[in-house]
Image (cartoon, rainbow, N blue to C red):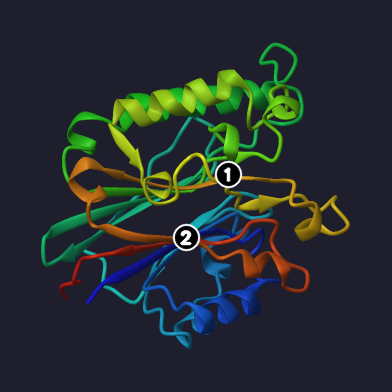
Amino acid sequence: MTITLATWNINSIRPRLHHVAQFNADRAPDILCLQEIKVHNDQFPTAALKKLGYKHFAINGQKGYHGVAILSRIPFAGIDMHGFCDKGDARHIEVTIDTDQGPLRIHNFYVPAGGDIPDPVLNDKFQHKLDFLEEMKGWLNGVETSNASILVGDLNIAPHENDVWNHKQLLKVVSHTPVEVDALNAVQAAGPWQDVVRNHIPVDHQLYSWWSYRSRDWSAADKGRRLDHIWATDAAADKVSAIEVFRDARGWEKPSDHAPVIAKLDLVPQD
């Protein structure tokens, strides 16, 4: 037995609930981590999702924007959440599940996008993004990462040259600027965390999980960025045996601009 875990910025759960059902029919992940659910907790469509086989929910919702949730066929041994930058934004939720090799903690993040101007003096949203990453770096280390943990989510940064369609053109575009990449790398190093997506799909291969709505034919143009990530601590990284970016979902009618990223974990859940 294995556990499949997926991360997906759904860009509003209620109008795209049928996409979750379609994804479930195609891949049926055991654990699905969603970002930008855009609803309060009491408006989250748990009844419909239970019909898909998800019986356990951890929700940190927010109306209109933000919001994260974890849906699972596997019971949770614990649920927690962490606030950042004293803004009250719903950008993190975590759960713990019991496995045959001990507890596994799963963090689900939605990092601020950062606005359009990559200058913290001129753009408060960009400063917020950098502050958020600095707080992540200060928290996600030591005792928080000494055991088996997985971190997933829309981190809103494409760190490698082959995580964007054109490295040189995007060096001054928010999500691929050197200051953001350095900040994300510092979060990863502080854990330390392994980028298990790139463990399985080497950095010399171009890989994207997001394509702008502005492109008339997104697939043909293929001007993407890898904004959605799966990381693991050293104690969990070797349990990840396969990675897939489910690109098909970006081509569905009225889709999210993100595609799900899926990890297969060689672990057996324990009730």
Disc with the residue nearer the chain's start (2 vs 1): 2
Is residue 73 toward the left or the right of residue 61 in the image? left
Tell me the residue at 88%/57% (across/down).
Answer: 216
Question: Is 230 placed left or right of 17 in the picture?
Answer: left
In this rendering, the answer to whether 195 lies above or below 218 is above
User: To which quarter of the image does residue 8 belong?
Assistant: bottom right
Residue beneath disc 2: 69
Q: Residue 118: give x, y in percent of width and height.
A: 70, 21
Give me the C-alpha separation between circle 2 and circle 1: 18 Å
Drawn side of residue 190 relative to residue 8, left or right? left
Seen from the viewer's position, the closer of residues 42 and 121 is 121
Specify the quadrant of the image occupied by residue 115.
top right
The quadrant of the picture occupied by the N terminus is bottom left
Query: What is the tally of numbered marks visible in this picture?
Result: 2
User: Measuring 29% from the left and 70% from the top, which residue is drawn there?
Assistant: 3
Identify the residue at image location x=32%, y=39%: 194
The residue sitting at the bottom extreme is 51
Q: In x, y percent, where is residue 201? A: 44, 50
Q: Residue furthest right?
A: 216
- Residue picked out by circle 1: 227
- Residue at 23% across / 57% down in the picture? 239
Q: Does dot 1 land on a helix, a strand or a loop?
A: loop
Residue 13 visible in the current orientation: no
Identified by mark 2, the residue type is: Ala
In the rendered image, which quarter contains the C terminus?
A: bottom left
> Compared with residue 46, is residue 12 higher up or lower down, i.e. above or below?
above
Of all residues shown, which one is farthest toward the left? 101
Tag in front: 2 or 1: 1
Residue 190's disc is none
Q: Residues within 10 Å of mark 2 (few under 14, many from 20)?
A: many
